[in-house]
Image (tube, rainbow, N blue to C red):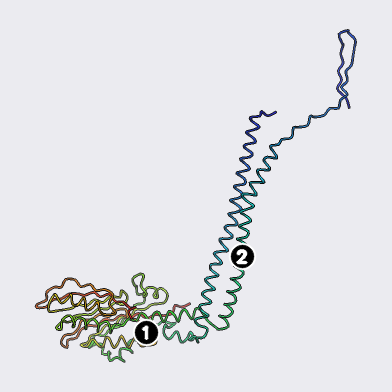
Amino acid sequence: MPSRKYQGKNREGSDFIHVDLLPEMKRPRQFNVNIIFIVLIAVSLSWLLIYLPLNDRQSDLDSAYESQNDLQSRVELTDDIIATYRLDPERIDFMNDIESIRALQGGYGDYEDGVSAAVLSADSSGRLLDFNYNAVTGEIEATVSLTRSLYFSDLEIELLEAEFVDYVDIPASEPDGARHVSQVVIGVDDDAE
Amino acid sequence: MLSKRLNDIIFASIIMLVVIAVFIARFFILGLFDDRIERIEEENTRLEDQLAENQQLIRDYRDEALPSQAELHRYIPSSYAEDRLLYYVYAQLELNDIQDVAERSLSVDIHDDPTYPENTDFRTYADQYDAKRVYIAFETDDTSEARDLVTHMQDLDQLFILQNVRYDIPRGGERVEVEINFTTFYHPAD
C-alpha cells in the first residue's frame, strides 16, 4: 500500500499533496559469480586430490582384503592337514632342539689325537704337556714342549692341515731347560667334515 | 557496500581456505586408507609366513612318525632334582671305574645357573631350557679315562654336552687332576 505522502505548498502558494504510488521494494542484489568460481575450484580440487587417489587406494584395499581372505583360507586348510597328521609344532621344535644340542658334542677325542699327532710330526721328541678344550669358545689351549723353537713353525703348518682346525696361534716359545715351550691356541671348526 | 579491494581479498582468502581444507581432507582421508592398507599387508605377510611354515612342516613330517613327548623327555628331562642328577652322575663314574672318592680326590658339583658367553649355542639353549653344569674332578695317571668318561656320558640318553675338559699330560705314572664340565638341560616347567 502506498503510504509515503508529502504535503506542502508550491511556488504559487497552493497546497498540494504528493503520494508515491509505487510499491516499496528492495533492489535485488547483484549475483556474485565468485561463489560459482569457489565451488568450481572446491569440486575440481576434491576430484583431483581426493577422489582420484582414493579410488586407487580403494582398489589397493580391495586387493589386500582379497589376498587376506585367500591366505586365511589356505592357512586354515594347512592347519586342518596338520591336525589330520597330528603334527605338533611344539613337539617338532623340541625334537629339533634336541638334535641341535646333540650336535654340540664336539669330537674332543679326535681333537686331542690330532694335536698329539701334529706335535709328533713337527718334532718326534715333542710333548704335549697339558690339554684344555673349551667347547663353548671352540678353542683348544695346549702347552707344547719341543726340542727346537724352529719346530713350532712346523707345528703350526701341521695343525693347519688338520681338518678340525680353523686357526692356530703360537706365541714365541720360551726356553725350558734344553727344550722350548709355548702355549698353543687352536680354533676348532666344528662344522669341518 | 564493500570496496572492490576488500571484496578481492575476501575472495582470495576463501579460495585459499578451500584449497587448504581440500589438502587437509586429502591427507586425513588418504592417511586413514594407507594405515588400513598397511595393517592388512602386515597381516598378510604374517599369514604368508605362517602358511610357508605350515607347508614346510607338512612336507617335512607328513610321513614321519614323531616320537612321543615322553620319549623326548628321555633326552631333556622335564623334572629336575639335584640329588637325582648327582647320584646319576656318580653312577656313571662308577660304571667307568672312577669311584674311589678319597683316593682319587673325586668331586662332583652341580651348578644350577651356569653362565655362558653371548652369541654362543650354549647360551642360546641355556636361555631356552633349564641348563645345569656338572663339574667333575678326579685324579688319574691315565688321561684316557677322561676320554672314556666323555664318550660314555655322550652316549647316554640324557644329553650331557661336554663344555670343557682340562688336564696335564702325565709323564711317568704320576697322578694328574682332570677337570671336566658337562652341560645338561631340563625342560622348563610350564
Dot 1: element: helix
Which chain does the numbered disc 2 sit on? A
Residue occupied by mark 1: B85
Instruction: Quadrant for residue B177, please give it.
Output: bottom left
Relative placement, left or right, of A138 versus A148 is right
Q: Amino acid at mark 2?
A: Tyr
Dot 1: within a 10 Å radius of its alpha carbon, few (fewer than 14), some, or many (20 or more) residues?
some
Residue occupied by mark 2: A65
Q: Residue at x 56, y 64 (%)?
A: B41
Which residue is nearer to you in this view: A41 or A88? Answer: A41
Q: Residue at x 62, y 33 (%)?
A: B9
Report the number of numbered marks: 2
Dot 2: element: helix
Relative placement, left or right, of A184 versus A4 is left
Where, quadrant-wise, is the N terminus of chain B in this rendering?
Answer: top right
Q: How far is the residue under mark 2 from the one under mark 1?
A: 55 Å
Which chain does the numbered disc 1 sit on? B
Query: Extreme left residue here?
Result: A178
Instruction: Quadrant for residue A35, please give it.
Output: top right
| Marks 2 and 1 belong to one chain | no
Which residue is nearer to you in this view: A178 or B105? Answer: A178
- Which label lies toward us, 2 or 1? 2
Q: Residue A124 at x, y = what percent? A: 15, 84
